[in-house]
Image (cartoon, rainbow, N blue to C red):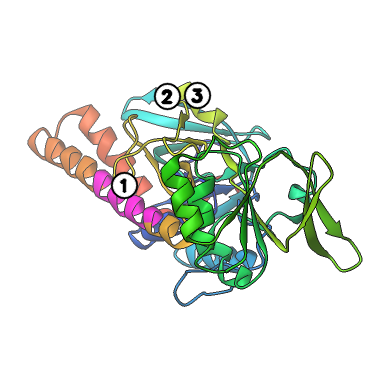
Amino acid sequence: MHEMYDVVVVGGGAAGLNGALQLARSRRSVAVIDAGAPRNAPAEGVHGLLGREGMPPGELLERGRAEVRGYGGRVVSGEVAGVRRVRQASGERFEVELADGRRTLARRLLVTIGLVDELPDVAGLRERWGRDVIHCPYCHGWEARDRAIGVIGSGPMAAHQALLFSQLSADVTLFAHTMPALTDEQWDRVAARGIDVVEGRVARIEIDAAADRITGVRLVGGKVFAREVIVVAPRAALRAEFLRGLGLQPQQHESGMGEYLPADPAGRSEVPGVWFAGNVADPSAQVGAAAAAGATAGAQINFDLVMEETNAAVAARNDPFSAASEARVNELAAVAAPERHHGLG
């Protein structure tokens, strides 16, 4: 593939599709490369998103893909294996290579790849993840209301989680497991909210397979505490090895929730021409926040391209006999016609 796009979006979740929608509506040639592994795939519905409350994640993404395509954008199934800078007569570009060997060029890159949630090493958690093993009171809290909730402490945010879930149920137990010891202030807070604290490591989650539900938490010593819903704090792991060629390395989030790639409020990374949006830059972002970040980044990228094109046009106007200016203007004119760039098909 030797085609070039104004923007290649890596990741087809809410952030990537909303960014692509902004760009396509601005008549930019844009391709979304999606590996088909959204972070919220285990969830039954999207919550906290106005107008789409409870919609299955897959349905939301399918609607988004159709909207992007409706404005001339392309959505391509594939996994990005690497990105590198290449220099052309008209300037630097990003060469995007897929795992199957396909390649394309991009003037700008919007990275919105999701995260992999690494759960605590407790038997039974993964099987129930996204159902009655949850992590976010705003994503799943309403569905857990008034039920017996167990918070498994595996990090410094466990007491904070327990406090938030105590707003949703009067029956919350914090299992200390591997979390740091509670401070005196934390003890006061959890006690004031009526949260029980159980010392000892958790061995596994008890599951009634026939009834398809969680029944309790078993400690290493064998004691079982009846629970219906389990709250954990997963560690976010980035799928961003393909960015290392650009010198971009994940950092550890100060909250302890895992990895992320820092960006400014507009989504700009430390590498010129590369933007981030969604969970890659904010592991705690819900679907609505991720989509909003994608829209912001898409608008900022379009503005950045407009300024580049304007500067090239000014240079060509002032020096119309410059071969470099002529080549530059011709390239920009070609890229500005999305219908001529099918790429990655």
Q: Tell me what residue is drawn at x 46 percent, y 39 percent.
A: 183
**Helix, strand, or loop for circle 1?**
helix
Q: Is residue 306 left or right of residue 142?
A: left
Q: Position of residue 113 (x, y in %)?
A: 53, 44
Judge by depth and name the residue closer to the eye, 8 or 260: 260
The kind of residue on which mark 2 rests is: Val
Sequence order check, earlier mark of 1 and 2: 2
Q: Nearer the viewer, mark 3 or mark 1?
A: 3
Between the residue at mark 1 and the residue at mark 2, the CA separation in whole angstroms equals 19 Å
Judge by depth and name the residue closer to the eye, 304 or 233: 233
Q: Tell me what residue is drawn at x 80 percent, y 61 percent.
A: 215
Please tell me whether the stretch drawn in magenta is mainly helix, strand or loop.
helix
**Helix, strand, or loop for circle 3?**
helix
Q: Is residue 282 visible?
A: no
Residue 273 bears which disc, if any?
Answer: none
Judge by depth and name the residue closer to the eye, 279 or 108: 279
Q: Nearer the viewer, mark 2 or mark 3?
A: 3
Label 3 sits on residue: 244
Label 2 sits on residue: 86
Q: Position of residue 93 (x, y in %)?
A: 39, 31
Between the residue at mark 3 and the residue at mark 1, the CA separation in whole angstroms equals 22 Å
Kindly check if marks 2 and 3 are in contact, taking CB atoms under 8 A apart as contact: no
Between the residue at mark 2 and the residue at mark 3, the CA separation in whole angstroms equals 15 Å
**Helix, strand, or loop for circle 2?**
strand
